[in-house]
Image (cartoon, rainbow, N blue to C red):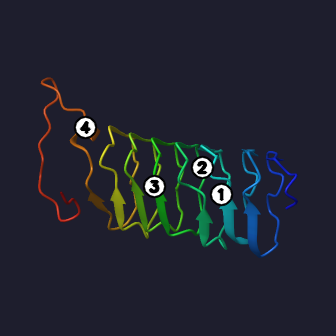
């Protein structure tokens, strides 16, 4: 894209069947579903992007890598649904929206500042192997439903709402570590 492009509107490149890399490092505003269903194999985002909009990478089955995610603080619903990228690392991420990674190819995700995981965020992620969320405080309903052999590594105890009225029993499991 030309360096003068600062905004990509809702659905603007959706379904584009151009293979290869796309450099969006000059883009400061991305619309919902802007790249959904496209055939790009790699995407370079502007490091100033803090929110991944709804459905941005939905159904991007050819996508193998995304760079520029370190400044992202929020992932909106369906942002990576059906996306083929396998490994993610977020330095500033605090919130993952509903169905954000649903039925995607994700294998690992590390998000040291993550606090909120929305409903069905990882639903159907059969390749998911490891999540590292040491600061998580809230996990939505069915967040990991049908997500394979997931190891919850370094998950904060605050993720579980424990109070005197609703005691919780912790049962050892081979799928939970630390």
- Sequence-wise first label, 4 or 1: 1
At horizontal 45% and vertical 51% (from top left) the residue drawn is 91
At horizontal 37% and vertical 50% (from top left) the residue drawn is 112
Left-right relation of 60 to 11: left
Report the Cα–Cα distance between label 1 and label 2: 6 Å
- Sequence-wise first label, 1 or 2: 1
User: Is residue 112 or residue 131 the one in the foreground?
Assistant: 112
- Sequence-wise first label, 4 or 3: 3
Q: Residues within 10 Å of mark 2 (few under 14, many from 20)?
A: many
What is the x, y in percent for residue 154?
25, 54
Report the Cα–Cα distance between label 4 and label 2: 25 Å
Q: Tag 1, which secondary structure?
A: loop
Disc 1 marks which residue? 58
Q: Which mark is residue 32?
A: none
Disc 2 marks which residue? 78
Which marked residue is nearer to the observer: mark 4 or mark 1?
A: 4
Q: Tag 2, which secondary structure?
A: loop
Report the Cα–Cα distance between label 3 and label 1: 13 Å
- Tell me if I can see residue 66 in this picture: yes
Q: Tag 3, which secondary structure?
A: loop
Report the Cα–Cα distance between label 4 and label 1: 30 Å
What is the x, y in percent for residue 147?
40, 62
User: Is residue 110 or residue 168 the one in the foreground?
Assistant: 110
Disc 3 marks which residue? 122
At horizontal 43% and vertical 70% (from top left) the residue drawn is 127
Which marked residue is nearer to the observer: mark 4 or mark 2?
A: 4
Q: Is residue 112 above or below residue 85?
A: above
Report the Cα–Cα distance between label 4 and label 3: 19 Å
- Tell me if I can see residue 118 in this picture: no
* Mark 2 vs 3: CB contact within 8 A: no
């Amino acid at each position: 894209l030309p360096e003068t492009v600062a905004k990509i509107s809702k659905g603007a490149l959706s379904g584009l069947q151009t293979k290869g890399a796309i450099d969006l490092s000059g883009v400061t505003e991305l619309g919902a579903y802007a790249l959904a269903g496209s055939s790009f194999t790699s995407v370079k985002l502007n490091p100033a992007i803090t929110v991944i909009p709804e459905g941005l990478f939905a159904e991007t089955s050819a996508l193998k890598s995304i760079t520029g995610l370190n400044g992202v603080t929020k992932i909106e619903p369906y942002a990576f649904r059906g996306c083929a990228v396998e490994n993610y690392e977020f330095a500033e991420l605090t919130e993952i929206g509903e169905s954000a990674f649903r039925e995607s190819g994700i294998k690992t995700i590390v998000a040291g500042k993550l606090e909120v995981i929305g409903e069905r965020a990882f639903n159907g992620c059969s390749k998911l192997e490891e999540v590292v969320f040491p600061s998580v405080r809230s996990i939505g309903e069915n967040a990991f439903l049908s997500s394979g052999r997931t190891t919850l590594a370094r998950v904060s105890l605050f993720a579980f709402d424990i109070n005197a009225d609703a005691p919780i029993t912790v049962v050892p499991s081979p799928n939970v570590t630390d």
